[in-house]
């Protein structure tokens, strides 16, 4: 099973980006969604950003994960 967690883009360098995924900082490839911007939330799979998601929706999902962890 695969669970997608929203990740926030914190920096971009050509087709690579640094994301914050619930406090974990990672490097990913953004070549599949070239219109992504710093501050956008994305869904990441296998090191690739595959979809931009709405900030409000991302916050709701992150809240659910936080509540579950408690």
Image (tube, rainbow, N blue to C red):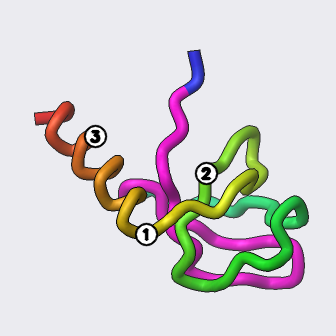
Looking at the image, is mark 1 or mark 2 nearer the viewer?
Answer: 1
Say which residue label 3 marks: 65
Residue in front for this viewpoint, 58 or 26: 58
Count of marks, rendered view: 3
Q: Is residue 41 above or below residue 5?
A: below
Magenta stretch, main secondary structure, is: strand
Q: Is residue 14 above or below residue 41?
A: below
Q: Which residue is mark 2?
A: 43
Q: Label 1 crowding class (10 Å Cα cut-off): few <14, some 14-19, many 20+?
A: some
Mark 2 Cα shell of 10 Å, populated few (<14), some (14-19), many (≥20)? some
Is 14 contained in the magenta span? Answer: yes
Going by the image, does 69 lie left or right of 40? left
Label 1 near label 3: C-beta < 8 Å? no
Image-based side of 64 in relation to 29, left or right = left
Residue that appears at 47% across and 56% down: 21
Q: Residue furthest top?
A: 1
Q: Indicate which disc, 1 or 2, sits on the residue closer to the N terminus.
A: 2
Residue 55, quarter of the rendered image: bottom left
Q: Residue at x 72, y 76 (%)?
A: 36
Which quarter of the rendered picture does the N terminus lie within?
A: top right
Callout 3: few (<14), some (14-19), or many (20+) C-alpha neighbours within 10 Å? Answer: few
* Labelled disc at residue 55: 1
Counting residues from the start of the chain, the first of labels 3 and 1 encountered is 1
Mark closer to the observer (3, 1): 1
Query: Whole-Å distance between the Cαs marked 1 and 2?
Result: 12 Å
Residue 32 falls within the magenta-colored stretch: no
* Numbered range of the magenta stretch: 3-23
Horizontal and vertical percent for residue 51?
69, 55
Quadrant for the C terminus in the image: top left
Residue at 51% x, 59% y is: 7
Mark 3 and mark 2 in contact? Answer it, CB < 8 Å: no
């Amino acid at each position: 099973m695969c669970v997608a967690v929203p990740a926030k883009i914190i920096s971009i360098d050509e087709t690579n980006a640094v994301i914050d995924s619930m406090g974990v900082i990672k490097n990913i490839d953004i070549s599949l969604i070239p219109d992504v911007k710093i501050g956008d939330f994305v869904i990441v799979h296998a090191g690739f950003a595959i979809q931009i998601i709405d900030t409000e929706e991302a916050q709701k999902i992150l809240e659910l994960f936080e509540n579950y962890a408690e």
